[in-house]
Structures are given as structure tokens and as C-alpha cells.
Image (cartoon, rainbow, N blue to C red):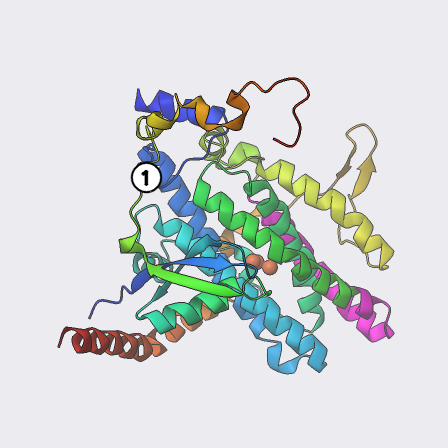
């Protein structure tokens, strides 16, 4: 029997209302164990109010190197930012 | 070509991530350094674990337990970082058991009295912190993030050790003597934790060029000594080095010669506890085998249930 267990990525919500954030990973053979290991490893100091674990193999990532081309389409669309627009002198609350 | 692009990235302080191209020697250097660091956290639990059941109060016991548990966590963060370089945890453990991977020599010394818990927290964790703070800026992303997390947790480790030392140093003459004895035994091995002098450390060049290390062994050692001298003074203990004195010109403390023969003897297996530490780790690993197998069998059963 192989001794390699599954790797699970761990995401923690630090406070109610905030987004879950990636903090690292754990080894575990099933999902309950993954949650318990994540709790023991990443929340020893009240770091979280909720934990997600997901098997690492299910994470799909863009290439980090030469990743520029992938994000190109958004570069030339400055009009998506509010600073692109000319506002009349003195206009407020906009 | 790739090599130049890689170095440019390093020079402009951008982090290297697991999927990025990297020179084989960079990967190898990181695997060696990170796994050695991980093994040190794990083996380092043993000398302190030795005193959990004999802590002098419930408060002391809870603190020591939490501290040792943190070290287990540090080991796991570091194994994770190391695995991103394409080596499995199983292989890493195997390398430790085969003696191919090292861990910090300091953990091959025995912990003879409760004062040693003070000396370890104050000096050993203190030295580790100086090293780890510097490594927060290491060029490899997963290692850097691990160091940041570890540094946040380390600060209580050094304080709890220093508190023990301060308490014993202001206690009965016998207690003070125990504290001084612990300092005497742990001082030199602690300052040798930073490794050989820069001139005798052949890998320093690459490690600095690739920004795996951000400061050299000697720089880190000096900064630890400069911080620690005053801490010893205010609790009335004496650092066991007659050559230790402030050098106005350098703006640093001068200090005596370290015994590198002893250092290498301990690294190469001749320390007082090398065999005991490794044997214990192997035994724990073998004793845990049935748990890993049971967990695996349980997860397989769950999967079969879903399929049927
Ligand atoms: Fe440590
Ligand atoms: Fe640690
Ligand atoms: Fe520590």
C-alpha cells in the first residue's frame, strides 16, 4: 500500500463576512481528516471562523510565468476604470 | 537564456513560484535547505518533549505543550513548501532516516534540567528567529510565505524561554546556578547554529546570488550576539565567552573562537543524542504505520460506497 496521502488546499475565512483566503495545504486521506488537520495546523490562534478544504488535484491554475498574454485582453480597456472619465469642474458625489 | 531571465527576475525582487522555470541547482539547493529546516522543527520537538511531563507547574506545562505543538506545525508548513519542488513527503522522511538529510545539530544535545527549557526558548529559538526573519525575504515564494507564518508564531517561543531563565536567575542560588549552567552548555552550540564562517561555506555564493539567503552566516550570527548580550546582563547571567566585548569601531560585539571540530563531530553523528533522536523518529514513524493504513482503507471504503 502506498503511503502517499492526498494533498488538500486549505482556505480560511478569518471573520464572518470576509472571503476565504488560501493559507496552505495538508495531507489527509479523507475530507473529515482534511478539515481536522487544517484546523489543527492553521487555526491554533483563532485565525478562522470557517475552513474550506479542496483536493489539490481539482485546482486549475493559469501559468504563472509568461502569464501576461493570458491577461492581455483587459490591458487596453482603460474605460473600465472610473479614472478614465472627464468630470465637469465642481461635480460632486460622483 | 532561461538562466538570464531567471536571474533578472531574482534581481528585480520578484518571487519564484513552483511552476516557474528554475535552474536545477536552485531547485536542489532549496530542497536541501527547506527539508533540513523542516526536519529541524520536527526533531527539535524531542529535547523539549522530554520535559512536558515534568514541567514544574500547570502553567509551564501548558505553555511548553503549545510551544512543541507549534514546532510540529512549522515542520508541516516547511514540508509543504518543499513538496512544491517536486519531492514527496515520503522521500523526505526516507532521506532523514537514511542520514542523507540533516537537521540542526543543536538538537543532538540533551536537556538535563528545567533550565534547559529556558535556554532553548531564549537562545535556540532566538537564533532561529534571526535566521527566519531574514528568510522571509527569500526568493522562493512558498518558502517565503512559510517563513512569514512561522515568524508570527515564534515570538512567544523566545519570550517563554527568556521568562524561565529570568525567573530562575532571580530564584534560589541553586536555581540561578542551573540557569547559568544551561546558558554555559547552550551558548556555543547556539551561535554555531548559523553554520560555518562565510569563508568556509562553499554554497553561500550561489545562495546569495539567487537570494535564497539574504544575509550570510556571519552576519546573522553577529546580529544574534549583539541582541543577546544585553538580555543576559539584565537577568544577571554571564555569557561563557571571556573574549566577548563591545567593539566601538565595528559597532558590534567581538567574540571568541568557536569549536568547529566539535560542530562537525556532532553534524557527522558523534553528538551525545544523534542516535537517540533518529531512532525515536523512526520508531514513531513505524508505530504510526497502522494508522496511515487504516485511514487509507477507510477512505477507499468511502469511495466504493459512492460508486455503488
Ligand atoms: Fe524551532
Ligand atoms: Fe519553529
Ligand atoms: Fe520555535
In the rendered view of the protein, which quadrant contains the N terminus of chain B? top left
Q: Please tell me in which quadrant of the rendered image residue A32 appears.
A: bottom left
Front residue (pair B296, B126): B296
Q: Position of residue B23 (x, y in %)?
A: 33, 32
The residue nearer to you, when weighing B152 against A80, is: A80
In the image, B300 versus B277, the foreground residue is: B300
Dividing the image into four quarters, tell me where ligand 2 lies: bottom right
Q: In this rendering, would B111 be left or right of B204?
A: right
Q: Answer whether residue B62 is visible to the viewer in this image.
A: yes
Is the CB atom of the residue marked by disc 1 within 8 angstroms of ligand 2's nearest atom? no
Q: Is residue B150 above or below residue B139?
A: below
In this image, B47 relative to B179: left or right? left
- The span picked out in magenta is B166-195
x 50%, y 29%: residue: B13
Q: Residue at x 45, y 22 (%)?
A: A78
Chain letter behind tag 1: B
Judged left or right of residue B50, residue A92 is right
Residue B170 percent location from the top left of the image: 86, 68
Q: Secondary structure at mark 1?
A: loop
Image vertical order of residue A23 relative to residue B288, above or below: above
* Residue with the mark numbered 1: B19
Residue B134: image location, x then y, percent: 59, 41
Above or below A1: residue B269: above
Amino acid at each position: 500500500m502506498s503511503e502517499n496521502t492526498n494533498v488538500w488546499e486549505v482556505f480560511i475565512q478569518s471573520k464572518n463576512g470576509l472571503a476565504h483566503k488560501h493559507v496552505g495545504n495538508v495531507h489527509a486521506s479523507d475530507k473529515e481528516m482534511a478539515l481536522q488537520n487544517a484546523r489543527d495546523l492553521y487555526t491554533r490562534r483563532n485565525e478562522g471562523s470557517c475552513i474550506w478544504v479542496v483536493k489539490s488535484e481539482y485546482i486549475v491554475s493559469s501559468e504563472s510565468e509568461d502569464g501576461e498574454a493570458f491577461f492581455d485582453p483587459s490591458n487596453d480597456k482603460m474605460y473600465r476604470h472610473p479614472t478614465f472619465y472627464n468630470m465637469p469642474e465642481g461635480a460632486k458625489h460622483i | 537564456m532561461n538562466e538570464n531571465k531567471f536571474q533578472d527576475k531574482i534581481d528585480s525582487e520578484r518571487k519564484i513560484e513552483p511552476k516557474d522555470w528554475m535552474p536545477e541547482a536552485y531547485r536542489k539547493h532549496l530542497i536541501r535547505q527547506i527539508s533540513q529546516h523542516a526536519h529541524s522543527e520536527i526533531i527539535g520537538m524531542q529535547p523539549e518533549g522530554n520535559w512536558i511531563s515534568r514541567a514544574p507547574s500547570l502553567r509551564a506545562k501548558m505553555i511548553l505543550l503549545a510551544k512543541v505543538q507549534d514546532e510540529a506545525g512549522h515542520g508541516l508548513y516547511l514540508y509543504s513548501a518543499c513538496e512544491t519542488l517536486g519531492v514527496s513527503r515520503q522521500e523526505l522522511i526516507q532521506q532523514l532516516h537514511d542520514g542523507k538529510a540533516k537537521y540542526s545539530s543543536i538538537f543532538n544535545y540533551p536537556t538535563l534540567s528545567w533550565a534547559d527549557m529556558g535556554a532553548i526558548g531564549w537562545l535556540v529559538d532566538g537564533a532561529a528567529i534571526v535566521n527566519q526573519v531574514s528568510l522571509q525575504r527569500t526568493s522562493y515564494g512558498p518558502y517565503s510565505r512559510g517563513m512569514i507564518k512561522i515568524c508570527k508564531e515564534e515570538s512567544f517561543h523566545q519570550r517563554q524561554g527568556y521568562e524561565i531563565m529570568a525567573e530562575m536567575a532571580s530564584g534560589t542560588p541553586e536555581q540561578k546556578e542551573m540557569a547559568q549552567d544551561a546558558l554555559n552548555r547552550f551558548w556555543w552550540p547556539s551561535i554555531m547554529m548559523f553554520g560555518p564562517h562565510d569563508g568556509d561555506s562553499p554554497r553561500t555564493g550561489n545562495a546569495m546570488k539567487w537570494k535564497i539567503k539574504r544575509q550570510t552566516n556571519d552576519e546573522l550570527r553577529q546580529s544574534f550576539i549583539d541582541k543577546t548580550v544585553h538580555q543576559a546582563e539584565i537577568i544577571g547571567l554571564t555569557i561563557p565567552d571571556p573574549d566577548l566585548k563591545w567593539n566601538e569601531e565595528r559597532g558590534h560585539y567581538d567574540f571568541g573562537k568557536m569549536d568547529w571540530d566539535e560542530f562537525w563531530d556532532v553534524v557527522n553523528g558523534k553528538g551525545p543524542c544523534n542516535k537517540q533522536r533518529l531512532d525515536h523518529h523512526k520508531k514513531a514513524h513505524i508505530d504510526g504505520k497502522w494508522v496511515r493504513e487504516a485511514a487509507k482503507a477507510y477512505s477507499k471504503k468511502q469511495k466504493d460506497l459512492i460508486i455503488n
